[in-house]
Image: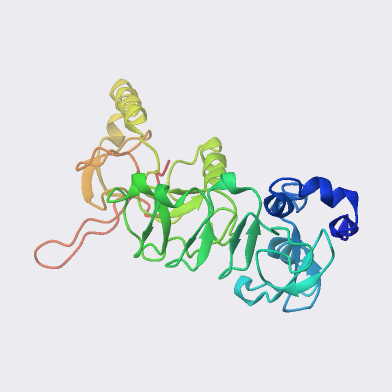
Amino acid sequence: MAMGGAQFHADEGVVACKVAGDGHQNRRDVGKMEHGCEHYRRRCKIVAPCCNQVFSCRHCHDEATALGDRHNISRQDVAKVICVLCDTKQPVSQVCISCGVNMGEYFCDICKFYDDETVKGQYHCHACGICRVGGRDNYFHCAKCGSCYAVSLRDNHQCVEDSMRQNCPICYEYLFDSLKGTRVLDCGHTMHMDCFAEMVDHNKYTCPICSKTALDMTLHWDMLDREIEATLMPQVYRYKVWVLCNDCNQVSKVGFHVIGHKCGHCSSYNTRSTSRPADSSGSSSPLMTDSSENNNL
């Protein structure tokens, strides 16, 4: 896209107006926030090193090739860009070698990344190897989880090795470099915030990966306590069953009830039926109830 390339020739009045006073700085800012795509505001396009086609950004490339010869761009491999103001093809750099504009107010020469919308707080994380948003002071890199987390989670989350280098368990999009916000569950597993909200809307309150409770269920557990107390089981159903708690991983022997089985250790109702633990002789009893029964939320 060659928009207003001629405006940068010195013999035109437009440039005389643009560069009046602090002309160098004004020229750098020409076209800022006026160009780009749905993903980024920038004043250049990239030449895909894999197919030599021109796209606004790597996401536009990946979306365009998704239905055909599907392949993704490695951001670090981008070597050529095209200024959208003067249409000059050139090596990757922040300032156009022809018209002198900043092709991105934020520029990373490692990721070959440009963005005019600096309110996002972009920064490059050397441990992650990519650029992230949100402000460097607001995030820290967790070496075990393999990603940047909000500082509020420093020493305040359950580490799961490479938890962000996985697919979202709901939509299966790769989380590490996703543009969508991510939620870290209490168990340490991760998923998109939007996917988590949709999961809760469908009355699913446990981690899809490990089945641990994903929300504070104290009020709900109290409600189940009252319902069970008010609902007397017939004599024929007054027997004990063994349950495994998905939250604390402990086994309890509790009274059977159709409403739910409360863990005898942590008081969670996020339990499932199991067999009796092996006794001191190493033997174990047969299943007291159907082992496929699951009282997950």
Q: Is 136 situated left or right of 46 in this image?
A: left
Position of the C terminus by quadrant: top left
Looking at this view, is 110 or 219 the one in front? 110
Position of the N terminus by quadrant: bottom right
Q: In x, y percent, where is residue 226?
A: 31, 22
Looking at this view, is 19 or 48 the one in front? 19
Q: In x, y percent, where is residue 48?
A: 74, 73
Q: Residue at left 34%, top 65%?
A: 144
Looking at this view, is 286 or 131 the one in front? 131
Residue furthest to the front in view is: 21
Q: Is residue 151 above or below residue 142?
A: above
Q: Is residue 200 above or below residue 54?
A: above
Q: Is 25 situated left or right of 282 in this image?
A: right
User: Could one spot residue 215 in this view of the protein?
Assistant: yes
Looking at this view, is 253 or 290 the one in front? 253
Q: Is residue 42 above or below residue 198?
A: below
Q: Residue at left 68%, top 64%?
A: 95
Q: In x, y percent, where is residue 150?
A: 40, 48
